[in-house]
Amino acid sequence: MNPSEKNIPVHHLTSEQFQLMTLDTGHPENFNDIHRHNFFEIIWFNEVKEDSSLELDFEKHPLRNNQICIIAPGQVFNMKLRGEKGYVLAVSREIFKEACDIETILTGGTAPFTLDLQSGKTCNTIIRLMEEEYHTTSRINLLKTYLKAFCIVITEQISLQDPMIHDRQRIQELIKLIEEHYIAQRETPFYADQLKISTHYLNDIVRFSRGTTVKKMIAQRLLLEAKRELSFGALTVKEIAFKLGFGDASYFSRFFKKHSGQNPEAFKCKKD
């Protein structure tokens, strides 16, 4: 395969800032390849198969009826459709940020989560109104209003399933900081200083809310970027090592094997 052909595809919104589609009646986006978006995508799975699943940033998630997945711009997504039913909302960054103000979602989307019965009914009413408006006069301000109502309901579900969400504001700030600095800054005190809390306290809240440590979060972000580069980039292992701030390729290889169980060359060959 030519290295240039390994660049990960990016799907774009065309002339519209908002699109409403269904999974079962001809969704125009090709799900059957691994790709990213430059927009937010909300997928509501009304009916799925017994073994339906999707991959989000190389992690496989089984699906159940009445689940929603929110994919943030830049996330790597893959799913092979096999007759699942549901809705797909493709939303520009600008409109999505008007409709949804939970930092967790704006930072990294969500894995599939389940709507309870009442929320499912409410969302169904909203989506029907949205669908009617979209296919008739398509007034963007009204569509934004429906989208905001939809997001209020689904983010309440996220809060209920994660009751500590309001105590995790610093965690979300930490995620943003790691996203910005993970290549250059790999030590916990830097992030604690940025958040104006002690290193000990920062590790405590990370351990309590996420079951990990700051250093492991940074390592996982590095590992994810390494996997992306190895899977879809044109760089050599040595070039990737230097791009990600490692002093030499052997150090990078040891890091990659420690956190993934295989060396970079084996991972790259497996993806070819």
Image (cartoon, rainbow, N blue to C red):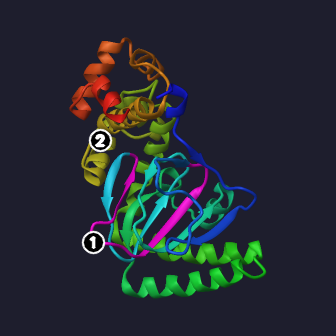
Q: Quadrant of residue 9?
A: top right
Q: 26 or 215, which lies in front? A: 26
Where's residue 174, x and y in %? Answer: 43, 43
Where's residue 46, x and y in %? Answer: 42, 78
Q: 40 or 84, which lies in front? A: 84
Nearest to the eye among marks 1 and 2: give it: 1
The answer to whether 69 appears left or right of 152 in the picture is: left
Q: Secondary structure at mark 1?
A: loop
Tag shown at residue 50: 1
Tag shown at residue 118: none
* Range of residues picked out in magenta: 37-57
Whole-number angstrom distance, CA of label 1 to CA of label 2: 39 Å
Residue at the image point whose x is 35% and y is 29% from the top: 268
User: How many residues crowd around disc 1 within 10 Å: few (fewer than 14), some, or many (20 or more)?
Assistant: few
User: How many residues crowd around disc 2 within 10 Å: few (fewer than 14), some, or many (20 or more)?
Assistant: some
Tag shown at residue 203: 2
The answer to whether 172 appears left or right of 13 in the picture is: left
| Amino acid bearing label 1 | Glu
Q: Quadrant of residue 64?
A: bottom left
